[in-house]
Amino acid sequence: MPRFAVVPLREAIERAAPFNLQEYVGYIKQLGSGQAGKLTPGEGETALTVRRRLTTAAKLAGKRVVLVDAAEYAALKRRLTEITDALEKISRGDAAYRQGRTKSVSSLSELGR
């Protein structure tokens, strides 16, 4: 009959992993909150393999990671910069900043109606 024993999650993950996750845990520990890193698959590795190892290592390290494609990250960062710039202009009351062009008219006849 099999014997059952409760083991710590970290130990279970380390036993189940066919590779050493300490390298990946080291990568994760180098990052602080709000920081990003870039990890490129080595020879004989696929992006999916690296992604799986990284998420497993994050669980071991007790950290939450968000994995995004490099192009997607660049697009998100660009958009965030645009939004931040717009909010700064609005908060300064920058008269030159407008969402769209407007035209002042004194009557509807000036619009050709």
Image (cartoon, helix red, strand yellow):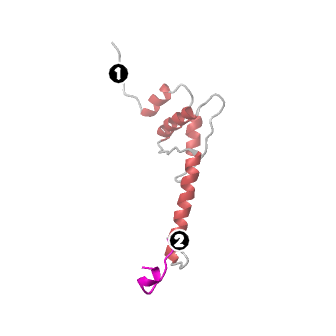
Residue 78 picture location, percent across and down: 57, 57
Side of 40 where 2 appears, left or right = left
Q: How many dots with numbers?
A: 2
Tell me which corner region of the image, top left, top right, bottom left or bottom right, holds residue 25.
Answer: top right
> Start and end of the magenta stretch?
100-113
Taking the view exactly as shown, the residue that stands out farthest to the front is 112
The verdict on residue 107 being magenta is yes
Of circles 2 and 1, which is in front? 2
Picture quarter with the C terminus:
bottom left
**Between 109 and 33, the one nearer to me in the picture:** 109
| Mark 2 → mark 1, Cα distance in angstroms | 60 Å
Q: Is residue 67 visible?
A: yes
Secondary structure under badge 1?
loop
Q: Which residue is mark 2?
A: 88
Name the kind of residue labelled 2 in the image.
Answer: Glu
In this rendering, is residue 91 above or below 56?
Answer: below
Task: Name the disc covering residue 104, or none.
Answer: none
Task: Name the disc covering residue 4, or none.
Answer: 1
Residue 9 picture location, percent across and down: 42, 33
Taking the view exactly as shown, the residue that stands out farthest to the top is 1
Picture quarter with the N terminus:
top left
Q: Main secondary structure of the magenta part?
A: loop
Residue 34 picture location, percent across and down: 53, 54
Residue 10 picture location, percent across and down: 46, 33
